[in-house]
Amino acid sequence: MTDKLLKILEYNKILELIRGRAVTSIAKEKILELRPCVNYDEVVQLQQETSEATAMLARRAMPPIAAISDIRAGLRRSEAGGILGMGELMAVASVLHTASALKRYLETEEDLEIINSMAYRLTVLKELERDITEAIISDEEIADNASGELAAIRRKMRQLNGKIKDILGEMIHSAKYTKYLQEPIVTMRGDRYVLPVKAEYRGNIQGIIHDSSATGATVFVEPMAVVEANNQLRALAGAEKEEIEKILKEFSARVGENSGIINENFNTVIQADVLFAKASFCIDYRCHSPEINRDGYVNIKEGRHPLINSKNVVPINIYLGKDFHTLIITGPNTGGKTVTLKTLGLFSLMTQSGLQIPAKSGTQMPVWEDIFADIGDEQSIEQNLSTFSAHMVNIVDILAKVRKNCLVLFDELGAGTDPEEGAALAIEILEYVHMFGGTAVATTHYSELKLYAISTGDVENASCEFDMETLSPTYRLLIGLPGKSNAFAISKRLGLPDKVIEGASSRLTAESIRFEDVVAELQSKRESVNEALAEAEKIRVELKNELRSSQEKNREINEKTSKLLDDAKVEAARIVQDAKGDMNAILKEANKVAKEAADKDKAREIEEIRKRLKNAGDSYEKKLGERREKLGINQPLKDVKLGETVQIISINEQGGVVTLPNASGDVMVQVGIIKVKANVKDLRRVTDKKPEKSAGSRYRNISGKGIESKTMTATTELDIRGMMVDEGTMLLDKFIDNAIMASIKNISVIHGKGTGALRAGIQNYLKHNKFVKSYRLGAYGEGDSGVTIIELK
């Protein structure tokens, strides 16, 4: 992919936007060097990297990457035994510090495989980082504690400095020497302390003359009293320099020993800087990672060109590469045709560079082996080429390189010459690209290309929508519908006289007029269909939301009911326990009295106790009844009738009684397709509601009669007419489960004829259902193609 192509599709501007999000200068350079990859596996890997980085940024702040310097040259010198300067060692310490902080940042996300591998490549050299940071203060200064020897040398130097300043201080404040001095100050010449003496008194102060002023009026004398001290100070300065060189050499050797690790740390930090700059761009522009394929299939959902202001950009949908491989876009100027070409081309470059694209999730993009584009005004004054010639030079170069799995973008193909010849050339150019297996998208105004797309397989029309009421483009792409130039309508609105427009209209051929009328009619019908589909989708979403709301309410009701029943059981158990306690006390008293009973008075007392016992029992029975009534619990059955609906308390299910109680009080209850044995003590009569039907009248019972319950009854027919495919398959799945439980082998589903979409969806579901042995459409008398007959295994 050439640099010219990248410039035409404005890929470089995307890189500049990403570059501004990087921290290090090296990462900024690498971002500008990013180029699309043509290897499928590498593109998938790059997309995975970016996805993980965006996931990381969604959870946390930007990574702790500092503006580190390029240390690679210094590392190579240290490996070879060279000595690094203080500034270079500080840069190494900065890299080690950044690597350590970045490792801690990356290690927090265990579920991100690539991020974790990046953290694994970072090695912490804490001791080396600490030693360099503590020893080196700046690019030109090293700390006293860098070594014990350096600290001792500098201590002696400070003592000598103090001694020299004291001696010279006494001299400049002494009446004996003041008159000989130009100024009462101590200054330096050649690293030695001197006094500024008047030239005429140079002999009055014994010492060494080191310099004189420009006028010669002042000489700078080092008094003999400080010569020896200055000599010692100079010797110490030399020793200091040697010690600093020794320290730097030791640090450089340690860096050299770890150069491989440090270099890996440096490269990983730069890689992370580039990666998170890309991820930051993707988040800011609301991008999603496309699904990558090898098949040349493009399906861009609501794609937004990233260089158009987000307030003005109109999302577009583009798809090709499956049902057709050549797309011809027509429509008025400034309608968005060229933007569509550039969006497709730029999204392809971004995808293959590991960048997410500003489109909806679910967008699919291929990996192209090459991309070619002939877009824009190619007129060349320097080469003395017209617009048409310049375009042809470019197209000739493209056709020489085109091959399978390439994307070719043509803007105003065949323009700039005689329309008839231009249209013929355009068609043959597209045929040539198709012959070599390329995928092409071209914009044009030629009606001949619209007809070519209609009459040729693997070629499709598209248009940029135009609002005839406002006479302005909407910038939406309509695939499957050729566009109109709308030249007459636009010209009339701009003020062109009606007479001119009428004259121009009369010059059109009848065939051209009919074609444009057909296009207008198709566009009108498409808009009507789209409106109907939008309304249908709105209703579907509303119904789905209502269904979800109803299910949520049912769940809440069931939870509340279950809690009430649990509370009731606890309360009933407490009442029974209290009753037992009171009755036991009464019985205990009765037994005691019975033992002592010997006369009629005692007998009357026993009778009184029995009455109390009965009253207590009645009282607690009344309490239980009131509690059941309050909580909505039905009374226990005292008699059972065939066919009545009851609730089996232990399993919280309803069903119909199919047998009368036997000697033990056991009955058979039909619960759905299952008969359950239950004792009358475990039954409650359901009097407040009828059993629910699971799917209304859509189910037809095997015998045409039987017991309906809140579970689905066994059936042989399912009616799903008017449903969406998803709703129908869900209902059919449950229907098959019930049929299998009822040992039914042959069932049928009524889906109607309609458009055939529901029938196709149902048969696709049956094709992959492991319980289905075979299926076929109904024969005459069975419902024809509106019914599918199913045989279960």
Image (cartoon, rainbow, N blue to C red):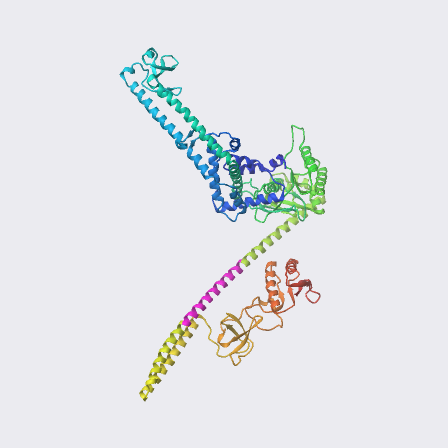
Q: Give the percent coordinates (x, y) of residue 172.
A: 30, 18
Residue shown at 50% from the left, 63% from the top: 554
Q: Nearer the viewer, residue 694 or 501?
A: 694
Residue 386 position by quadrant = top right
**Is residue 540 at least partly visible in the picture?**
yes
**701 is higher (above) or lower (below) than 278:** below
**Which residue sits at x=60%, y=65%?**
737
Of residues 192 and 672, the one drawn nearer to the viewer in this rendering:
192
Q: Position of residue 690 (x, y in %)?
A: 52, 71
Asked if the stretch drawn in magenta spans residue 562, the answer is yes
Q: Residue furthest left?
A: 175
Count of marks placed on residues? 0
Q: Quadrant of residue 232?
A: top left
From the top left corner, tell me how far across and down residue 706 is, in percent. Answer: 59, 73
Q: Quadrant of the C terminus?
A: bottom right
Q: Can you see residue 467? A: no
Q: Quadrant of the N terminus?
A: top right
Relative height, residue 644 to residue 502 (above, below): below
Task: Indicate whether 749 appears above or below 144.
Answer: below
Dominant secondary structure (helix, strand or loop) of the stretch shown in magenta:
helix
Q: Is residue 210 inside the magenta stretch?
A: no
Residue farthest bottom in this picture: 599
The picture places residue 125, in percent across and down from the top left corner, at 47, 39
Task: Write down the region rendered in magenta.
Answer: 545-573
Q: Relative to residue 656, is residue 580 drawn left or right? A: left
Residue reaching furthest to the top: 200
Query: 502 or 664: which is nearer to us?
Result: 664
